[in-house]
Image: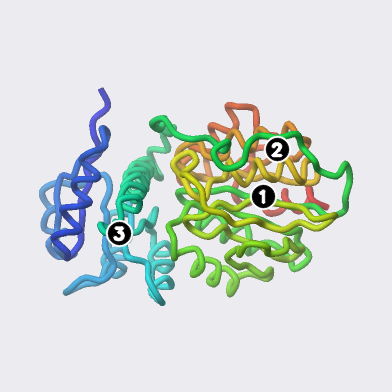
Amino acid sequence: MTAKKKVMIVDDSALVRQTITEIINAHPRLYVSATANDPFQAAERMRREIPDVIVLDVEMPRMDGITFLRRLMAQRPIPVVICSTLVGDNSATHLAALEAGAVEIIQKPNLSTRRFLEESSIRIQDAVLAASHAHLSRRRAIPNEEKQSADAVLPQARPRAMLQTTHKVVAIGASTGGTQALRQVLQAMPRTAPPIVIVQHMPEAFTSGFARRLDEQCEITVSEARNGDSVLPGHALIAPGSSHMLLTRSGANYRVEVRDGPLVNRHRPSVDVLFRSVSCVAGANAVGVIMTGMGDDGARGLKEMRDSGASTIGQNEASCVVYGMPAEAKRLGAVETEVDLDDIAARILRLSA
């Protein structure tokens, strides 16, 4: 039997530590081996036992989480999941945490609503498990529990794409490790780049800050998608956290639909939902890209895109933080070409020319 992964929780709130401990211990492959109320206590605990994953708050007494993260990555890299409320202007701080080396970012569970607690529990377990597979281990994703498919949001339908158009569209899906990978791809895009629609697994209230940061760093315009937004050349739209995003078409013009719905493959937004919509309305006029991430969200949707005539790309194992989603897509025959992260942008531009 595979040994459970050891998790350390570092947060100054006793209630948060208790709640996250209960959530993590409820997963059959994880357990909390230690907790700490600040980074100094965490360092003391780590002298006795090194965890496989650290769940880390940002705002704490004596030392903030980002300073601790930077020191940890410089001295002894351990997969870190940032756990925060993600409110207001703090989003820039949490983006800085990802740039400093955090593997994932999750939202603290809100005990006031049953649905939020249930969905955040799934998100926390998945993020911590994904982090335990990051970097050196690069193991295959562990199959998830029973989950809903894209049918729950968008039933499979006969493609209705135009046979030929000069208006190409690129759809990208990513999860664990995707924030840095997406930044590298989008920074390489010129202003003449084809329109891009993106699902990056992220919690609510984080995607807007992520999009703003990318917009500052890229030649193309990057924004969080709003319902009815046009999909235009030189623009990238990122699905908002906690909402599905679908591609639609009015005449020859593409738009996005942002809608609520159940978790699909344990995620909302779901890559499978986006890819299915692209296969239906864009068909062979699309390029699909599946990048680093735990699990299998997007694999079946990418297969539908390829079956509808789209060109498809998978990020290779060597450049993935977690080779889960691209591996499953490759296994299904959904990946036409597998390339290194450094080459994805150039391949997209060639295929969409």
Q: Quadrant of residue 107?
A: bottom left
Which amino acid lies under the numbered mark 3 shown in the image of this protein?
Lys
Q: Nearer the viewer, residue 228 or 165?
A: 228
User: Would you say 68 lies left or right of 350 here?
Assistant: left
Distance from the alpha carbon under mark 2 to that under mark 1: 10 Å
Q: Secondary structure at mark 2?
A: helix
Pointer 3 residue? 108
**Mark carried by residue 171:** 1
Pointer 2 residue? 305
Distance from the alpha carbon under mark 3 to that under mark 1: 29 Å
Residue 315 visible in rendering: no
Is label 2 in contact with label 1 (beta carbons under 8 Å)?
Answer: yes
Q: Quadrant of the N terminus?
A: top left
User: Would you say 207 lies left or right of 115 here?
Assistant: right
The answer to which of marks 2 and 1 sits earlier in the sequence is: 1
Q: Nearer the viewer, residue 7 or 198?
A: 198
Residue 120 visible in rendering: yes
Q: Is residue 327 above or below residue 350?
A: above
Q: Residue at x 64, y 50 (%)?
A: 246
**Mark carried by residue 337:** none
Q: Residue at x 59, y 43 (%)?
A: 273
Q: Is residue 43 above or below residue 140?
A: below
Q: Is residue 86 above or below residue 171?
A: below
Q: Nearer the viewer, residue 112 or 15?
A: 112
Which amino acid lies under the numbered mark 1 shown in the image of this protein?
Ala
x, y percentage for residue 144? 40, 33
Within 10 angstroms of label 3, few (less than 14), some, or many (20 or more) residues?
A: many
Distance from the alpha carbon under mark 3 to that under mark 2: 35 Å
